[in-house]
Image: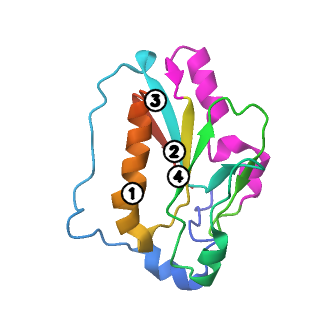
Amino acid sequence: MSAVDSFRFLPRSFRSMYENVVPLDDETSPVWAPFQTRLAEASVALLSSAGLSVAHEQTPFDLENERLNPFWGDPTHRLIPHALGQRPLAMSHLHVNSRDTLADRNVSLPIDVLDDLIGEEVIAGAGPAHISVMGYQEAGLAHWRSQTAPAIVELLKGQETSGLILAPV
């Protein structure tokens, strides 16, 4: 079995930046919140870092500014409806190969897998919306902490989501 090369789609100059990341001074402990609700009674949402948007319906993430400054990433988020049906997704991410995600959305946003768990009564239900962000946000952490993350938390609270499953790419 061969090792996964997490840096395959990054420019070579980025490898040293992400390979041995050192936590910030105030972020040395893991963030943990106990899950109080039984999964069989929980409403769950998904959060993908693949830069997904609903094709032809939502504005894609800003790749132009990222091309101009590869250390910048669009700090906004997109709501992906759980009732997506067969509507196609678009993927805006310069650091990840989109081929597999566009062929099967479950690679980066496992909505169908979540539906299977709901059907098996492992999870009670899904939130009406899931969230997609663009990964690689190191340069925009201040915006992320002050605006993006609080907006996502409020959305999750507003739709009475019990838990969030992260689907990083």
Looking at the image, residue 107 lies above or below residue 76: above
For label 1, the crowd category at 10 Å Cα-Cα, with few meaning under 14, some 14 to 19 and many 20 or more, is few
Tags 1 and 4 touching, CB below 8 Å: no
Q: Which region is colored magenta?
A: 98-127
| Cα–Cα gap, marks 4 and 3 | 22 Å
Q: Nearer the viewer, mark 2 or mark 4?
A: 2
* Dot 2 amino acid type: Leu
Residue neighbourhood size for the residue with mark 3, other residues' Cα within 10 Å, grouped as few (<14), some (14–19), many (≥20): some
Do the CB atoms of the residues marked 2 and 1 lie less than 8 Å apart?
no
Tell me the CA gap for discs 1 and 4: 20 Å
- Sequence order check, earlier mark of 3 and 1: 1
The numbered mark, 2 or 4, whose residue comes first in the sequence reads: 2
Q: Is residue 125 magenta?
A: yes
Q: Residue at x 69, y 50 (%)?
A: 58
Q: Which residue is mark 1?
A: 147
Secondary structure state at the residue bearing disc 3: loop
Q: Mark 3 highlights which residue?
A: 159
What residue do we see at 64% from left, 52% from top? 52
Left/right placement of residue 112 relative to residue 169 reads right
Which of discs 2 and 3 lies nearer the camera? The answer is 3
Q: Which residue is at 63% across, 71% downward?
A: 8
Q: Secondary structure at mark 2?
A: strand
* Structural crowding at the residue carrying mark 4, measured as other residues with C-alpha within 10 Å and reported as few (<14), some (14–19) or many (≥20): some
Between tags 2 and 1, which lies in front? 1
Say what amino acid the circle numbered 3 marks.
Gln
